[in-house]
Amino acid sequence: MSYILKTVNLTKAFKGREAVSSVNIHIKKGEIYGFLGPNGSGKTTLMRMAANLIKPTEGEIEIFGDKLTDKSYEVLKRMGTIIETPVFYEKLTARENLELHCEYMGYYDKGAVDKAFELVNLKDIEKKPVKEFSLGMKQRLGIARAITTKPEFLMLDEPINGLDPIGIREVRNLFKILNKEYGITLLISSHILGEIEQIADTIGVINNGRLLKQVSMESIREEDSEYLEITTNNCKGAAYVLENDLGITNFRVIENNCIRIYGSSIPQSELSKTLILKDIAIDSINRKDVSLEDYFMKILNGGGISA
Amino acid sequence: MLKLIELEIKKFKLSRFIKGVLIADLIIAGVVVLIMFGERAENRVAFEDYRTAAFIIGAFVKMTFTIFAAVILSKIVIGEYKSNTIGVLFMYPISRKRLIAAKLAVVMIFTFLSIFLSDIFIGFVIYVIGLWHDLIPVVLTAADIAGFLRNSLVDAAAYMGVALAPLYFGMRKKSTSATIVSSVIICSVLNSGSGDFSLGSIIIIPILLAVAGVVVAYLTIRNIDSKDIMV
């Protein structure tokens, strides 16, 4: 399988403190990779390393299959990047900034700048220097700059910061378009799960510099997304009945009085009837969803921090 | 490389500085003319010969434009660090060394041209006004002109290096004020003295400083590929 970005035991320490610790991240060609983690978890540091701005203390980075070194400049031509809040030459206009960008990138396509403005929906900006832009506009302009040169790999650090709800939706759609129609691979970081789960194909969860989990959204959705929770004071008996009379094996006794049944097609009424007939008192029976929120909170908490 | 220099000029709108140079030239010429008329009012002669006049003009020009150069240096090198745009710049598919070298080249070219051309321009203005009001009591010889041009070229060349020396002070804390202040200090030390003597007139001193400037520039660039850029 070809990876756009792959790291091997990537570590970065600042003054002896590890900001990123032996991370092995794998971003497949053509996917949207959501990079999830609380503030200060090491997302930005990792992206800076991938953009070759800072150098790993240990480990390796492979981009487009080639090892990244101090002298890897050519590879930057194929990437579009926003790290933290995008910065511009504030006294120049948006167009001048983007034209400058194209010149430095060695990209000469007259319509590219207009096309980028159109994609991010930036209007009425011709005369204004960038210093008069709002944060949301700068964020859009940053995205515009990153996509002007039609990169193969987009690396966006918290791209939704500073956008209003409409902006967020527009940008989310834009990411999907870039991914589906232009075949661009995206790495999008965020500390807000809700933003990521809607667009990402794969999610990497990072905390305290460690990659805790790397999992495809598809498998999360398939896995245990729904369950029935039975509260009873006779767990043993209930478990026996479930297994022998109903043929359910995929259940778990959570506490002394609570059983969760996963992925069962047996209707709730059938279940309660059987249990009651077997003389097992049921206090309650509920259908519940494991939200992704819970799923990731669990991972993050397992990583040693409290919510 | 030329392309990169051109982009730097465009990015920082450096063409504006041409106007600044012209204004500075006029002010310097005005001051020198004032000195000449002032001395005459007291029945003295400001410049015994053209060599002394050239010396005074040269001192003014060197001081002014070394500081000008420091302003440009702080704007296009230190300024990029301060405004974090260096991170944008270093994500381009161009070697960091070449990017910084282009910036330093801009400063060097500016220093050379502004010093050399201003010397000629102000020298010409002073000559014409001096001739007109009979302010300089000797006749201009071809040797005077040749000497003037030669000195001016040597100054301009040496100060290309001197102009880079403030980089050392500016880069330590990425401070624009340190860059400009250090340049002012270097200039004042070089051009202080009495009569037609200054530290700078011992040619070895500006040359040493020029070498130091170039060394500083080299050291700044040397390890830049492996430096962490924290934007």
Image (cartoon, coloured by chain):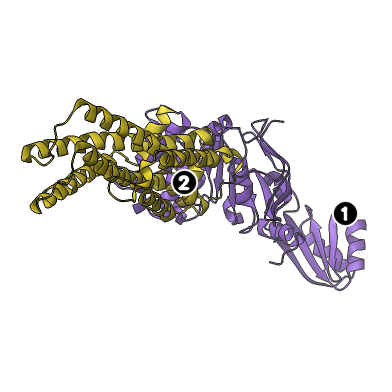
**Drawn side of residue B176 relative to residue B63, left or right:** right
Q: Residue at 72% across / 54% down in the picture?
A: A225
Instruction: Locate residue B10: give its quadrant.
Output: top left
**Drawn side of residue A223 relative to residue B1, left or right:** right
Task: Out of A217 and B66, give the one closest to the viewer.
Answer: B66
Q: Is residue B21 visible?
A: no
- When the figure is inspected, residue A45 is found, relative to residue A2, above or below; the finding is below
Q: Amino acid at mark 2?
A: Leu
Q: Which chain is purple?
A: A
Residue B167 — which label? 2
Q: Residue at 75% across / 53% down in the picture?
A: A224
Q: Is residue A100 visible?
A: yes
- When the figure is inspected, residue B147 is found, relative to residue A207, above or below; the finding is above
Which chain letter matches label 1? A
What is the drawing colour of chain B?
yellow
Q: Are marks 1 and 2 in contact (CB under 8 Å)?
A: no
